[in-house]
């Protein structure tokens, strides 16, 4: 934030800053121009991404890695449109903005931002700098091959690895310089419009195949005491010394934790310098380690030093200019997705899913994630470039790939302007059909709801379900819903392939009740509810049954 000589403005700016991370209601608009800059706010442990002074729910998509050129953008926009996304995540690579050292070219960024404005779509820029999926592929050629100046990591056996070391001042300086140039340019072209609402710093950092750098500089640093900021946050999974060297404190986890600290500290310097110029929210993403296997030291089974759930505290300690540590979800099993959401949604970490598989079976997680209070979600590879990233994502391209996500976003779009505020107030819930296809109960304030799946709209399927007679589209798990409790007895829900049965809970437990009203409809551009029909009789007597067409209901319940 800029220094000001006006004492009133200075006081306002200080107030805006002090409430950004405070557990207090945040004033949405102040006189300061900077108050309108996108920023993350927290209220009682819930988060919102503020865009133009209002909570913004990101219905995102991420383009393929090589779509970051003007000539590739048409195929990206076509997919963005079909999927009804309000935000595009797309790379800006170091190699493309600084192909020659010190000579910057922002023509792609200018084209991208101008086209996004034309389409009415916000942008999240992905800084592919020193690390992209841990490697230096997106650094300029003058960086990649000058390993004297920009050294690679050394493994335990003394061999040079593929990954640039996080302990090089030269590399940090060069990356920071390029990133600052990007943020300076963004500020110049976009400060008044906020087309770009967030920036990812690096991409899926960490290292495969070596737990850390074993070069001389790294070895010396590894023998130093663990910094106090890390000790204060990161517990050791095994008993260790309260302070001392990394090995003394963290035992068999020391190598991984040291590497996480080195990378997080590097990212902090890049982010801090960028934010000093233009203070957009920033986050890091990560390739997940297995979320359910019992905790154990690194055994070449994930990218060491990346911001996995077990080292979120190290990233928080070392990188305060990074707002969010975010999971990239390419694990489709429902119990693992549930575990990931729990691991990354913390009072000190907003839930945000910047990447997720784009195969059909992931589409049901959109409503679950938004219902959990995420600031946004973004399937990866929603882009009609001639490329599919199967088996991580869909085998199909074109509309066959985008349609399952598009039909959810299209309907959710009517709710999106209201959802962010409900989510910030902690009123939202979400769930998705599990791989076990079982019913799921969910308790809210004085009301509960049980979700079941593969039901017709009338009557009840026998248990076990007659597989020869299941509703079309329910052959594989596809049910989900996001629900907001907007009043004591009032709910807004969007669902697909799901049956919902309400029941009285908490203060209402044991009381008889009925639906007062179950309206199907949508919210108009002014946020006013527009009813299309009232569900009663057959449409409500057998639970509220959502088909494969995502539908919004506004529900009022009453006890008697
Ligand atoms: C995760 C990475 O962050 C993306 O850039 C991409 O490489 C996907 N994996 C795989 O398609």
Image (cartoon, rainbow, N blue to C red):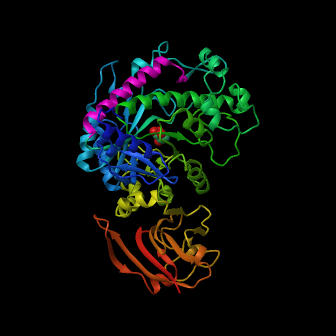
Please check the rendered image and state whether residue 177 is part of the magenta-colored stretch, yes or no: yes
Q: Nearer the viewer, residue 438 or 220?
A: 220
Which of the 4 image quarters holds residue 240?
top right
Q: Is residue 430 above or below residue 189?
A: below
Residue 389 % position (x, y): 46, 44
Q: Nearer the viewer, residue 195 or 459?
A: 195
Image quadrant for the N terminus? top left
Q: Nearer the viewer, residue 379 or 167?
A: 167
Q: Residue most toward the top?
A: 148
Which of the 4 image quarters holds residue 194?
top left
Residue 378 in view (yes/no): yes
Report how many numbered discs are placed on residues in the image: 0
Q: Is residue 24 above or below residue 436?
A: above
Residue 392 % position (x, y): 51, 46
Residue 164 % position (x, y): 51, 23
Q: Main secondary structure of the magenta part?
A: helix
Please check the rendered image and state whether residue 46 is part of the magenta-colored stretch, yes or no: no
The span shown in magenta is: 162-191
Residue 432 % position (x, y): 53, 62
Which of the 4 image quarters holds residue 536?
bottom left
Q: Residue most toward the right?
A: 239
Which residue is rendered at x = 54% and y = 46% of the image? 348
Q: Residue most toward the front?
A: 7
Q: Is residue 2 above or below residue 361?
A: above
Residue 394 in view (yes/no): no
């Amino acid at each position: 934030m800029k220094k000001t000589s006006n004492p009133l403005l200075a006081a306002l700016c200080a107030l805006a800053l002090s409430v950004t991370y405070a557990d207090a209601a945040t004033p949405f608009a102040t006189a300061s121009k900077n108050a309108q800059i996108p920023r993350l706010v927290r209220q009682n442990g819930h988060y919102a991404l503020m865009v133009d002074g209002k909570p913004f729910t990101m219905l995102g998509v991420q383009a393929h890695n090589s779509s970051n050129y003007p000539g590739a953008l048409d195929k990206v926009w076509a997919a963005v449109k079909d999927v009804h996304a309000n935000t595009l995540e797309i790379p800006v690579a170091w190699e493309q903005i600084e192909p020659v050292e010190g000579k910057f070219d922002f023509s792609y960024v200018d084209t991208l931002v101008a086209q996004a404005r034309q389409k009415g779509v916000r942008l999240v820029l992905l800084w592919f700098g020193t690390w992209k999926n841990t490697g230096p592929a997106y650094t300029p050629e003058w960086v990649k091959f000058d390993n004297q100046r920009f050294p690679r990591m050394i493994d335990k056996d003394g061999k040079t690895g593929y990954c640039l070391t996080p302990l090089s001042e030269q590399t940090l300086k060069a990356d920071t310089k390029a990133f600052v140039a990007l943020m300076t340019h963004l500020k110049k072209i976009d400060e008044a419009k906020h087309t770009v609402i967030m920036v990812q710093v690096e991409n899926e950092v960490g290292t495969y195949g070596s737990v850390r750098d074993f070069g001389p500089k790294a070895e010396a640093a590894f023998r130093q005491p663990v910094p106090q900021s890390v000790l204060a946050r990161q517990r050791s999974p095994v008993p260790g010394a309260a302070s001392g060297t990394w090995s003394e404190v963290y035992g068999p986890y020391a190598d991984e934790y040291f590497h996480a600290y080195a990378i997080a500290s590097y990212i902090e310097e890049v982010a801090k310098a960028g934010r000093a110029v233009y203070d957009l929210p920033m986050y890091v993403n990560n390739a997940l380690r297995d979320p359910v296997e019992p905790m154990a030291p690194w055994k070449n089974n994930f990218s060491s030093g990346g911001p996995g759930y077990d080292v979120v505290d190290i990233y928080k300690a070392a990188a305060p200019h990074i707002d969010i540590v975010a999971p990239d979800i390419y694990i489709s099993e429902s119990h693992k997705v549930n575990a990931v959401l729990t691991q990354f949604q913390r009072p000190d970490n907003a839930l945000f899913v910047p990447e997720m598989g784009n195969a059909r079976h992931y589409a049901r997680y959109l409503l679950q994630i938004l219902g959990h209070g995420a600031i946004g979600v973004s399937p990866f590879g929603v882009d009609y470039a001639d490329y599919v990233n199967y088996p991580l994502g869909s085998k199909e391209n074109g509309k066959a790939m985008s349609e399952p996500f598009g039909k959810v976003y299209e309907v959710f779009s009517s709710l999106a302007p209201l959802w962010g505020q409900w989510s910030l107030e902690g009123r939202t819930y979400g769930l998705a059909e599990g791989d076990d296809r079982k019913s799921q109960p969910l308790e809210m304030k004085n009301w509960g709801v049980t979700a079941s799946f593969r039901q017709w709209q009338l009557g009840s399927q026998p248990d076990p379900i007659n597989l020869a007679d299941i509703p079309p589209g329910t052959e594989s798990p596809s049910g989900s819903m996001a629900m907001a409790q907007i009043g004591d007895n009032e709910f807004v829900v969007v669902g697909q392939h799901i049956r919902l049965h309400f029941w009285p809970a908490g203060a209402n437990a044991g009381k008889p009740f009925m639906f007062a009203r179950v309206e199907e409809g949508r919210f108009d551009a002014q946020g006013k509810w527009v009813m299309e029909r009232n569900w009663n009789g057959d449409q409500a007597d057998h639970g509220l049954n959502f088909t494969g067409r995502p539908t919004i209901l506004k529900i009022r319940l009453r006890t008697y």
